[in-house]
Amino acid sequence: MANQCPICGKKSQLKRKLNKLRGKYNPSPKKRKYPNLQWVKIPIDVKKPAFKKFAGKRIRVCTKCIKTLSKRK
C-alpha cells in the first residue's frame, strides 16, 4: 500500500462534513483523508519490538509512530 504506515497500519479514511441548513442536512461530498507520513531513518539500536524489523532502514512512518520512536526509556 502506498499511503499506509508499515508499523501501526494507519491508512486513508473516507470522511464527510455534514452541513446543516434550516434544520436539515444537505448532501455533501465525501473526501478522502490521508495519514501524515514522513520519511524517517530507524536507528539500528532500537528497543521497541514494533520497530525491530525496520532497524537501520529508511521508511515512511506516520507522525504518531515517530513520536513513540523518539520516546526513550
Image (cartoon, rainbow, N blue to C red):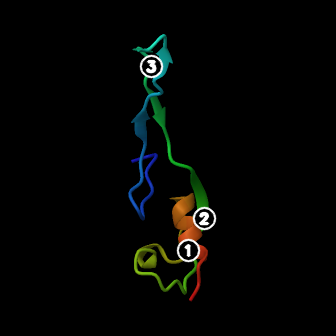
Q: Which residue is mark 1?
A: 69
Q: Residue furthest top?
A: 22
Q: Secondary structure at mark 2?
A: strand
Report the residue at 57% width, 59% height from top: 63
Quarter of the figure that contains the C terminus:
bottom right
Q: Which residue is mark 2?
A: 40
**Discs 1, 3 touching: Cβ within 8 Å:** no
Amino acid type, callout 2: Val
Q: Position of residue 42 (x, y in %)?
A: 56, 73
Amino acid type, callout 1: Leu
Q: Secondary structure at mark 3?
A: loop
Report the residue at 45% width, 56% height from top: 5
Establish if 28 lies above or below 62. above
Of discs 1 and 2, which sits in the foreground?
A: 1
Left or right, 5 with respect to 63, comes to: left
Q: Earlier in the sequence, mark 1 or mark 2?
A: 2
Q: Position of residue 14 (x, y in %)?
A: 40, 34
Q: Position of residue 61 (x, y in %)?
A: 52, 60
Q: Which residue is mark 3?
A: 29
Amino acid type, callout 3: Pro
Of discs 1 and 3, which sits in the foreground?
A: 3
Establish if 14 lies above or below 64. above
Q: Secondary structure at mark 1?
A: helix
Q: Earlier in the sequence, mark 1 or mark 3?
A: 3
**Discs 1, 2 touching: Cβ within 8 Å:** yes
Q: Looking at the picture, tell me which residue is in the foreground, 40 or 48.
A: 48
Report the residue at 58% width, 68% height from top: 67
